[in-house]
Amino acid sequence: MRKFIRREFFPYWKLFLLLFAVGFALGTVFANVAYRSRGQDVIELQLFSLENFSSSQFYNKDYFFYLLPRRLMGMAGVQVIGATVLGTPLVIAELLMYGFFCGTFLGIVLLQNGIRGILLFAAALLPQYLIYVPAFLGMFTVICSMSGQVKWRTAFFGRKAVQYCLWCVLFLTIILWGILLEAYVNPLLLQWLLKS
């Protein structure tokens, strides 16, 4: 099993990490430039201010139904495109985008709130991203593998198609658990951090 993972998945993960790191570096640079050149009327960069978080009220059920279509439809859309020759380019674009946004947000929260802001940023991602990250890495790996096969076979059919659909259902189910954590556990963690 360990050899299989090392042979089939690890090469993709190294590429994924590199793409995310490139996006993250670009996002950090963008955050510094945007934050330093902001005007007095720019409120968009107050996204991660502690005051905004402390004044927010969380409604778990409403938040869950807000997240549900967005997270699941996002993953489902990636899965549909991933079954075509566009799958690998899509994965590359997604990883660069995720890295860019993560770098931007982390840069802004660090500039606004210092060390406590970093803790807030980390708390905003936990525990749901412990589910989301492995799910997306797994799905991206399956997509890159399938996209390469579709490219050479010029068709999506048979046993490989069934396997791909089963992977899709599995990862959608995992994402659902992440949504539950994001809606019901993460707000409690944030509120605890703000009160401490």
Image (cartoon, grey):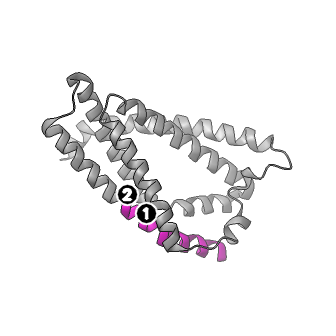
Work out whether residue 59 can be spotted.
yes
Compared to residue 188, the image places residue 112 above or below, namely: above
Q: Position of residue 146 (x, y in %)?
A: 26, 34
Compared to residue 102, the image places residue 187 above or below, namely: below
The magenta span reads: 175-196
Residue 6 falls in image quadrant: top left
Graded by Cα atoms within 10 Å as few (under 14), some (14 to 19) or many (20 or more), the crowding at tag 1 reads: many
Residue depicted at x 27% and y 53%: 169
Q: Which residue is mark 1?
A: 179
Q: Position of residue 139 (x, y in %)?
A: 33, 45
Check disc 2 and give the amino acid type.
Ile
Residue 64's tag is none
Q: Are marks 2 and 1 in contact (CB under 8 Å)?
A: yes
Question: In the image shown, does 91 or 127 lie closer to the viewer?
Answer: 91
Graded by Cα atoms within 10 Å as few (under 14), some (14 to 19) or many (20 or more), the crowding at tag 2 reads: many
Q: Which residue is mark 2?
A: 175
Q: Position of residue 57 (x, y in %)?
A: 63, 73
Residue 15 falls in image quadrant: top left
Compared to residue 32, the image places residue 88 above or below, namely: above
Residue depicted at x 41% and y 30%: 89
Taking the magenta stretch, the answer to whether it contains residue 28 is: no
Q: Position of residue 135 (x, y in %)?
A: 36, 52
Residue depicted at x 42% and y 67%: 180
Check disc 1 and give the amino acid type.
Ile
On the picture, is 115 further left or further right than 59?
A: right
